């Protein structure tokens, strides 16, 4: 019975992802963002609860990856597709096939999650950009472009060239052999957690200064700090 609790949280994550996709189809970008945000919390809680109750299982592991694929792979892929469509409506002369490049996001997310399930090196750190981090970045691009930027920033973020570069580069980062720090705290050692501490402090400062616009800078900051405080690869 205890194993049903984390699995239930994982299924709630999946439900949020499915609802976010339906919200995107109706043009409710903010609602989709809130649903993905809720899924991020549920994604943390299912693993935390499984560790707390000591009920790790192969079923839970596979279910978690399937839920993450939908919520943090398919959903941002559909969002990027919508952004390309919006760019086309703005009069940008782009090929009709270009929006379908957005499908690289769920495809490479699936590959990244499959690799994660069989890669024993990722217990202490990540190899490649985690799918939730990628979803955060893509949603931040969309929200800032559509609701919180100047006309100049909107023109940049919704330019087909920027969207194409973002899609291709984030898809590559998902499967790149790039060690990135995990936010899981294994001990209370200051030296072992200094990268995480610096990241959290800088995120707090960015949010204080830029408010929700800070979301656009958090994932690039995470990548840079992972290179500075490079995890030890075993």
Image: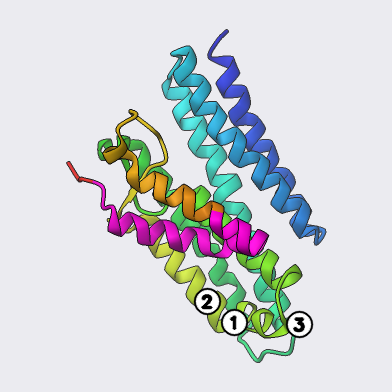
Residue 122: quadrant of the picture = top left
Residue beneath disc 3: 89
Left or right of 126, for residue 215: right
C-beta proximity under 8 Å, tags 2 and 1: yes
Secondary-structure class at tag 1 = helix
C-beta proximity under 8 Å, tags 3 and 1: no
Marks 3 and 1, Cα distance to the nearest angstrom?
11 Å
The question of residue 91 being in magenta is answered with: no
Marks 3 and 2, Cα distance to the nearest angstrom?
16 Å
Residue beneath disc 2: 164
- Which residue: 44% across, 20% down? 51
Marks 2 and 1, Cα distance to the nearest angstrom?
6 Å
Residue 129 placement (x, y as % from top left): 41, 54
In primary-sequence order, the first of circles 3 and 1 is 3
Which residue is at the far top? 1
Q: Residues within 10 Å of mark 3 (few under 14, many from 20)?
A: few
Residue 117 placement (x, y as % from top left): 37, 37
Q: Residues within 10 Å of mark 2 (few under 14, many from 20)?
A: some
Give the label on residue 75, or none: none
State the scheme by which the image is colored: rainbow
Residue beneath disc 1: 160
Which region is colored magenta?
A: 205-231
């Amino acid at each position: 019975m205890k194993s049903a609790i984390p699995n239930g949280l994982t299924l709630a994550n999946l439900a949020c992802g499915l609802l976010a996709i339906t919200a995107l189809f109706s043009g409710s970008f903010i609602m989709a963002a809130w649903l993905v945000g809720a899924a991020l919390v549920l994604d943390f809680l299912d693993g935390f609860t499984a560790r707390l109750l000591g009920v790790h299982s192969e079923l839970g592991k596979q279910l978690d990856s399937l839920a993450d694929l939908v919520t943090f792979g398919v959903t941002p892929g559909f969002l990027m597709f919508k952004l390309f469509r919006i760019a086309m409506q703005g009069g940008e002369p782009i090929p009709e096939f270009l929006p379908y490049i957005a499908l690289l996001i769920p495809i490479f997310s699936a590959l990244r999650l499959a690799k994660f399930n069989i890669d024993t090196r990722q217990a202490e750190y990540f190899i490649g950009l985690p799918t939730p981090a990628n979803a955060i970045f893509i949603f931040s691009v969309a929200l800032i472009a559509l609701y919180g930027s100047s006309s100049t920033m909107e023109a940049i973020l919704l330019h087909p060239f920027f969207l194409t570069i973002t899609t291709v580069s984030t898809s590559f980062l998902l499967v790149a052999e790039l060690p990135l720090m995990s936010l899981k705290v294994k001990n209370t050692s200051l030296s072992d957690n200094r990268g995480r501490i610096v990241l959290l402090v800088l995120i707090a400062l960015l949010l204080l200064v830029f408010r929700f616009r800070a979301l656009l800078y958090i994932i690039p900051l995470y990548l840079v700090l992972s290179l500075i405080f490079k995890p030890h690869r075993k």
